[in-house]
Amino acid sequence: MTDHTGTRHLLLLHGMGATGDVWLPGAPLLERRWPGRWLAPDLAGHGFSPPLSGYSFAGLAGRVAEELGPAADGSRPGERLVILGHSLGGVVALALAARDAGLPVDAVVGLGIKAVWSPAELVKARELAQRPVTWFAGRDEAARRYLKVAGLTGLFAPDHPVVDAGLRVEDGRWRLAMDPAAFAVGAPDLAALLAATDVPVVLARGEHDPMVSETQLAAYGVPVVTLPGLGHNAHVEDPAAVLGLLDPYL
C-alpha cells in the first residue's frame, strides 16, 4: 500500500489487473494539491494483497476497509474519506460508500466504470477466471502480459518500475501477481450501488474510452464528466486532468 500521511484521507483504487502503484506517476501532483493523507492500496488478489476465496465487489471493499484500519472509522474528528476509483476500483469505491458500510465517506469519483456488459463479455470473464496461472521464462515477457491485462500497454514501458508490483518471480520463472480468479467478480449493479449511498458521486470517463459511453453513464442520474482526448486509463494518461475532478472536495 502506498501511503502519504496527513490529516485527511484520499483513497485511490486501481482497476482490474493493475496495482496501487499505477497512481505513483501522479504522486508529485498529489503532494502539491491534496492537503492531507492519501493511500493507494492493492485490491485483493492484486499486487501484494492476498487473494480472496471468492470475488465480489463487497468482498473487495471489505478487504480495503480492513486495511484502512481504525484511522478511517470516524473516531478522530476531521478524518473523512474521498475516494477516486478507476474501473473496478470505481465500483469498489461505491461499495465502500454504502450507507451500511459504516465508513466516513464524503464523496466518490468513479473513473472509467464499465456500465454495460454483454453476455459474451461475462462468459469471457468467467473463462479467464478459471484459467491457471501462466508462467513466463523471463521478466520482459511477463511484463508485457501484465501491461496487456491491466490495459496499460503503451502507457508504461515493460521495464518501468511501476510494473514491478504487478509481477512475481519464483524459482526463476515469472508470473503476474494478479489472481486470475478475480475476473469472476462479474458485472456491477450500478443502480443498486448508487441507491445505497447518500454521498455525492461523479462518474467520469475519457473521451476515447471504448469501455463506457457518456450516454451509458448519464442514465444513472448523477453528474458525468468526459475528459477530452483521454482513454480508459485517463489517470495514467493525464494525472492532472483526473486529479482536477477532486478539486470540489479539497
Image: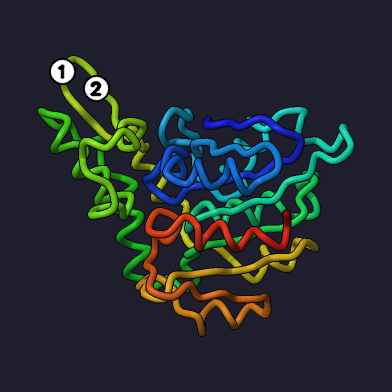
Quarter assignment of residue 182: top left
Amino acid tagged 1 = Gly
Q: Is residue 193 above or below residue 140?
A: below
Gap in angstroms between the C-alphas marked 1 and 2: 6 Å
* Residue 50 image position (x, y, % from top left): 47, 28
List the residue tagged with mark 1. Answer: 172
Q: Quadrant of the C terminus?
A: bottom right
Q: What element carries label 1?
A: loop
Q: In the rendering, which numbered label is found on residue 79?
A: none
Instruction: Give the residue displayed 62% in from the left and 49% down from the top.
Output: 33
Q: In this view, does 98 lie above or below 6?
A: below
168 left or right, relative to 181: left
Q: Is residue 132 above or below residue 209?
A: above
As drawn, the residue found furthest toward the top would be 171
List the residue tagged with mark 2. Answer: 169
Amino acid tagged 2 = Val
* Residue 19 image position (x, y, % from top left): 42, 40
Quarter assignment of residue 181: top left
Quarter assignment of residue 191: bottom right
* Residue 103 image position (x, y, % from top left): 77, 44
